[in-house]
Image (tube, rainbow, N blue to C red):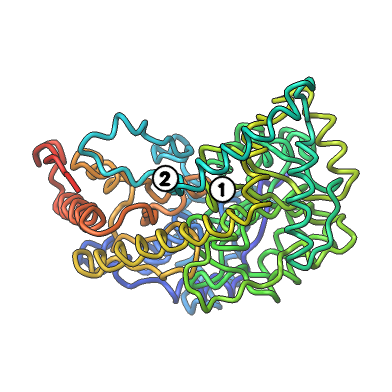
Amino acid sequence: MAQWTSAVGAPQLARLLRSQDPRAAELTANGRKLPAYRGLADGVRLLVLEGRVPVAARLPAERELAAAVGVSRTTVAAAYEALRAEGFLESRRGSGSWTAVPAGNPLPTRGLEPLPPEAAGSMIDLGCAALPAPEPWLTRAVQGAMADLPLYAHTHGDYPAGLPVLRQALADRYTARGIPTMPEQIMVTTGAMGAVAAICRLCTSPGERVAVDSPSYANILQLMRDAGARLVPVGLGERLAGWDIPVWRQVMRDAAPRMAYVVADFHNPTGTLATEDQRRRLVDAARSAGTLLVVDETMTEIVLDADTELPRPVCAFDPAGSAVITVGSASKAFWAGMRIGWVRAAPDIIRSLVAARAYSDLGSPVLEQLAIASLLESGGWEEAVGIRREQARENRDAIVEALQRHLPDWEFSVPRGGLTLWVRTGGLSGSRIAEAGERLGVRVPSGPRFGVDGAFEGFVRLPFTVSGAVADEAVVRLAHAAQLVATGVAPAEAGAPHAFVA
Ligand SMILES: Cc1ncc(COP(=O)(O)O)c(C=O)c1O
């Protein structure tokens, strides 16, 4: 059986090759003129490493690509041969050729591990896209929870679907957003991570295909890998303009994934906001293919530019509730330390998720659920979210300004929401910059953590978690790291980070 899970046509591949940054080819060529086959092979290799052509995508036949690119068939054959020798292509007679990444790829593709705050010292930790608790709302929420606790203290405390009061409050929020929702459609979970883990356990078996945005949130990718999923990456559209629906349709048809995991609002890491039309068409494609669409709304409330109008939620296009499962979280809108998330789905799916919970974490803590319920009921939630947005906006603007000042070569689109900036590192390796940065006192995750199989080597992700002088110093350190990588000087030779106080 062929190992490919999607296909890229000759006109599409030719267009992608033409759209490449000429500096990338110069970097590969090191100033020399490349033979045509080498230029073509390097172009395909970079498209795979940047995730613009997914891994396990069938490439066009040699003759078709030759015609589309305007080179001889011999040139394409030589390019394919070079890619095969380097581990970027696999072929089988009768099945064609499909993209791959070399075995033993040393690039880090695991999730993100936050540095314990007490271990940070002089390090500026940009590893984690989460802000400190908004006070005094955290204290008030916990006080509200303490006042309500006696009502629950005499019960067994075991609420696998979540506290009724919180299920109701969350259902009411969807209803207020124009999506009529009953409490029976909500399950409270331990963060969005707990929600996606529960959905994966219920809806997929090891070895099954799960389609994911490419790039996507590192820890969910790792969670799915650990659950045995075969990830099928689907590139975000050109210039991160949202989902590329024809590509999604093709992947759903060719790879028949059991499930797809997407982030429609202020996607992590790119900040992309899917349009209403893309939402409607993706639901339509998923329904036709029988693919369950899991939509993560963790970032939805982090709207940074006031004039941004959010399209309707993806589940608005699935009134029967059979194609879309929505995941939410209090982590970004309020505080990650609460570890409260939720699932919105059809009541029968919620019942199955709740039944399965007896074999995982049993339930989420009562006190934290009461705190979130009290925030939602008192209106404190909206006030806290308002503070969040202000902080994140200020941090975003500071990091963007610092990049423009110290690293004018690095490219990015400024997102209108969310907590992350996806930055192309001027043709340098994001992994090497992350390595050098760590020794220079700035910690950033490199692009491949957000990709499948080593894609996105030329990127890093920067979160909106620092402002002012700290944001500036973080980027100064990154600029230093980039300089070391560009000149090939080992970071150890560059001296220890100086203490930073701000
Ligand atoms: C898209 C997305 N999903 C899930 C999470 C994790 O959420 P939680 O803290 O609720 O588990 C994050 C955190 O960054 C995220 O960005």
Q: In the rendering, which numbered label is found on residue 459?
A: none
CB of mark 2 near ligand 1 (< 8 Å): no
Depth check, front residue: 472 or 279: 472
In the displayed structure, does residue 179 sit left or right of residue 481?
right
Q: Position of residue 341 (x, y in %)?
A: 65, 43
Image-based side of 454 in relation to 39, left or right: right
Question: In this view of the protein, can residue 85 be seen by the observer?
Answer: no
Q: Position of residue 312 (x, y in %)?
A: 71, 70
Q: Residue at x 69, y 55 (%)?
A: 295
* Callout 1 touching callout 2 (CB < 8 Å): no
In the picture of the structure, the residue carrying the numbered disc 2 is 132
**In the image shown, does 87 or 440 lie closer to the viewer?**
440
Q: Label 2 amino acid? A: Pro
Tell me residue 379's x, y (percent). 62, 57
Are there few (<14), some (14-19), or many (20+) residues within 10 Å of tag 2?
few
Report, in whole angstroms, how far the alpha carbon at label 1 lies from the one at label 2.
Answer: 47 Å
Which of the 4 image quadrants contains residue 410? bottom left
Label located before the other in sequence (1 or 2): 1
Report helix, strand or loop for mark 2. Answer: loop
Q: Nearer the viewer, mark 1 or mark 2?
A: 2
Residue under label 1, please give it. Answer: 90
Q: Which residue lies at the image location 63% right of the left edge and 36% below the top edge?
A: 145
